[in-house]
Every structure is written in C-alpha cells, then in structure tokens.
Amino acid sequence: MLAQDPEKMKSLIAFKKRLEEKLASLEAETKELQDSLDAVNGILLEKGFKRGDIKEVPTPPVSMPKEVILPKPEAEVPKPPAQHMPEPESVIPLKTMTDEPLAIIHFDKQAMHVLPDETKHFSVTTPPFGNFLVERVFVKMQEKDQELARLGQLTVDKVFSFNIVREGDLIREILIKNVDDERLKELKPSIRWTFEKMYEKMKSS
C-alpha cells in the first residue's frame, strides 16, 4: 500500500506543501483582482456612472478550486499543453459521502491508475460499471479522440485509451492513458460516483 512506502509518503508530503503554496498564491491573486475591480468601479463613479449602472455589468465570481493539480515544470514536459498530464506521483483518494474509501487515483509520467479498495471486491459485473463508466464515459472519450485523429486534429499516440486489469471478475486496476486536466475533471466524479453506486449495490445484496 502507498501509505506504507516511505518514498511515496515523502512524495505526498512534498505534493501537499506545493498545493498549500499554490492555494496561498491563488488567494493573494484573488485579493489583488478584487482590489483592482474596486478601483475600476471608483473611477467609473467619478466619471458619472451611477452605482446601479455598474452593477448591471455582470462580474464573474472568482472561485477557489476545490482541488489543484499542479503542472510539471515546462522544461520537463515534452508533451504539448493540450495533452498535459496532471502532476506525476500525485494521489487522489475517492470516498463515499460517509468517508468510506472506494479507490485512489494515482499518476505517473505515462498514465493514470485507478486502484479500487481491495477490501470492497469490486466486480466488472456490478452495475453501473459496464453500462455507465465503460460504455458512456471511457468508450465515448476514446471514440471522440479517434475521430479527431481520423481528421488529422490529433496524433494517434495522443488518443485516449483505457485498460481494465482483472482477476477473474474482480477489478484490480484501471489504467488510463492520455488524460489531460480537463479530462480529469470529468473522469474523477464519474469514477467516484460509479464505485459508490457499486458499493451500495454490494451492501444491499
């Protein structure tokens, strides 16, 4: 397990520190943007705009992301930005609403690994794994990239791909390649929801 590996723990602690530094930077940037907006509003008021006129122009809210995936230093990333992988050696836990562990998402330089909690014995035959996660999420992403590759808008080596590592019907790992930050935002909640629904069905059976 990752928690028992000193090297993995050191990597996680370093990654946590970088996340905290990034969040602090974002908070400072948010304050700076708000101060700039206040200054612009003050100038508009001085030029004769009414306060109500200013409010009619919608200002998009500045929201803090719940989870920040830090990019690798540019010098170390030979890939183009469109296929930028999330931070290597990072780990994202997936849990139920009651904090029950379901799986972890682990990254290395080449791929994204989904490792189900071994105590749950998740099976490929338990809905909605096959009909939702595989067919409606993984396959759809793969088909979309394959069409882009056919049109010459994406190279074949950048096409989304996945492989389900099984032991009988038990899911031991889901290996996913060519996942950028945008894809991760879609995959993470879809995978968590799927495993949570599978866990609920397993408990009720």
Image (spheres, grey):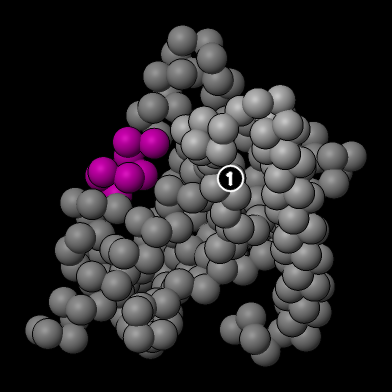
Q: Does the magenta stretch include residue 135?
A: yes
Q: Residue 6 placed where, x, y %? A: 78, 85
* Main secondary structure along the magenta-highlighted residues: helix
Of residues 47 and 1, the one nearer the viewer is 47
Place of residue 186 in the rendered image (x, y in percent of width and height, measured from the top left): 43, 48
Please tell me which residue lies in front, 99 or 175: 99
Left/right placement of residue 160 relative to residue 23 reads: left
The residue at 74%/81% (across/down) is: 9
Which quadrant of the figure contains the N terminus? bottom right
Asked which secondary structure carries label 1, the reply is helix
Res 77 → quadrant = top right
Residue 18 shows in this picture: no
Q: Is residue 90 in the magenta section?
A: no
Q: Residue at x 49, y 18 (%)?
A: 149
Location of residue 123 (image quadrant): bottom left
- The amino acid type, in three-letter code, at marker 1 is Asp
Callout 1: 10 Å neighbours few (<14), some, many (20+)?
Answer: some
Residue furthest top in the image: 151
* Residue drawn at the location 35% of the way across and 86% of the way down: 98
Specify start and end residues of the magenta stretch as a single range.
134-141
Q: In which quarter of the image is the C terminus?
A: bottom left
